Image (cartoon, helix red, strand yellow):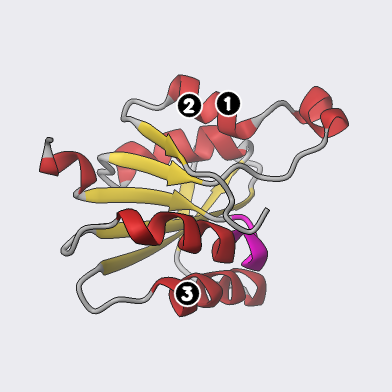
Amino acid sequence: MNDDLFERILVPIASPDDAEATARAVRPHLDSDTTLIVTHVTQGTAAETTVKTGRDQFTGATYEKFVDILYRDDLQFEWATLEGREVAEALTDAIDMMEATLVAFTPRDIDTWERTIAGDPGGKLIREADVPVMVFPDRQA
């Protein structure tokens, strides 16, 4: 297997609950010396995706939940709060900006109406990402 594939993993998290589910799902599959680029996307108005330098209270709580569940001394963590108009678009932009080699996430609990109105960000990410995308089941569900 190509070790470079798992070198820099972009891990989008949407909320503290999602952070917990994602951390539990990916934890058994991580090798030492992997870099996790943990991201949260906030709503932006500009056409391009930007990386915000600060953390608001919600984002900070989301990141803290992730690290509380997953923290290991043999992993490296990077934190990137993204600002973009669409979640999937912001994440695909971040793949290049953050030099990610893989994207890993758990599906969000989106009902049929939300999918109809807003689309499915996970499906769009899978179709448009320039790197492999791994989808892990939510182990809490």
* CA distance separating discs 2 and 3: 26 Å
What residue type is disc 2 on? Ile
Residue 76 image offset from top left, x and y in percent: 24, 68
Q: Which portion, as a residue range, is magenta?
A: 14-18
Residue 118 image offset from top left, x and y in percent: 76, 29
The image shows residue 96, relative to residue 123, as above or below, that is below
* CB within 8 Å, label 2 to label 3: no
What residue type is disc 1 on? Gly
Mark 3, Cα crowd under 10 Å, few <14 / some 14-19 / many 20+, is some
Instruction: Pick the residue in front: 23 or 97.
Output: 23
Residue in the picture at 66% in, 71% down: 58
- The circle drawn on residue 54 is none
* CB within 8 Å, label 1 to label 2: yes
The mark that comes first in sequence, 2 or 3, is 3
Residue in the picture at 48% in, 20% down: 127
- The circle drawn on residue 69 is 3
Instruction: Pick the residue in front: 94 or 141.
Output: 141
Residue identifier under label 1: 123
- Secondary structure type for disc 2: helix
Residue lying at the far top of the rendered structure: 127
The image shows residue 75, relative to residue 130, as above or below, that is below
Residue identifier under label 2: 126
- Dominant secondary-structure state across the stretch colored magenta: helix
